[in-house]
Image (cartoon, grey):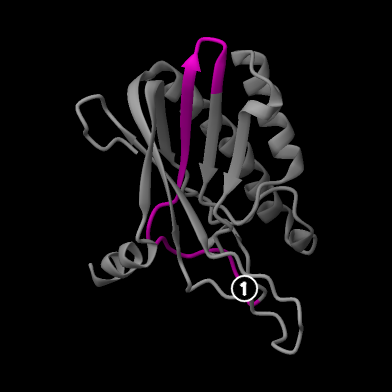
Amino acid sequence: MLKNIFIIAMFMLSITAIGSDFKVGIGRKIITPQEPPIWMGGYASRSKPADGVFQDIWAKALVIESSTQNKVIIVTMDLHKFSRQMSEEVIKQITQIYGIERSQLILNVSHNHSGPMIWPNADMLDFKPVDQQAIFLYSQEIIKSLMEIVERAMKNLEPALLSSGHGEAFFGKNRRDPKLTYRPEDHDVPVLKIETPDGTLKA
């Protein structure tokens, strides 16, 4: 609770209405790996595959439509990274199925350092074949899950109110050598708020 209050206080958003002539659809799915255990990505000290789950990880899709010919699809994943091979496959399928341009699709990961490894990855070259296979099969399941949540979001398009805001979060720091004269830090926090026509928060 205190953590949530701290984060909200740090943002101090200034909200600006965008408009009401939109339809929005949302889809989401848990993508926590099941059996067999998956090696985790994002840190060098790992010595074995994951042996438990602290909390589930998610993939989520947001479709924003201003007309039948104009829509944007945003897909987010609680993963450390997303390989080029996987992104190209997802892009190919979504653009073909829904007739959108590449510029209308955003694929984003949270850079989760407590998430599963994704195929392909140079870090797994020394892994046993059974571990490499598990990572490959999990990555294929990710692709299927992303297609599922985009389809779900497309089917759930409903009228919505959109507003945006910007705040600042100063707990993000550049960890490079303090002696360096160029150490960029971006504290800007853009937020998109989506409500139903009656004002209920949707996303």
Q: Is residue 10 above or below residue 16?
A: below
Within 10 angstroms of label 1, few (less than 14), some, or many (20 or more) residues? few
Q: Nearer the viewer, residue 45 or 37?
A: 45
Check if residue 55 falls in the magenta segment: yes
The one of 139 and 193 positioned closer to us in this rendering: 193
At a point 63% along the width and 48% down the height, the residue shown is 134
Q: Is residue 12 left or right of residue 95?
A: left
Quadrant housing the C terminus: top left
Query: What residue appears at the point 49 percent right and 13 percent down from the top-left corner?
Result: 67
* Amino acid type, residue under disc 1 in the picture: Arg
> In the image, residue 13 lies at what x, y percent?
36, 55
Q: Position of residue 2 (x, y in %)?
A: 24, 71
Magenta stretch? 45-71
| Residue holding disc 1 | 46
Q: Is residue 171 above or below residue 162?
A: below
Quadrant in which residue 101 is drawn: top right
Q: Is residue 22 left or right of residue 95?
A: left
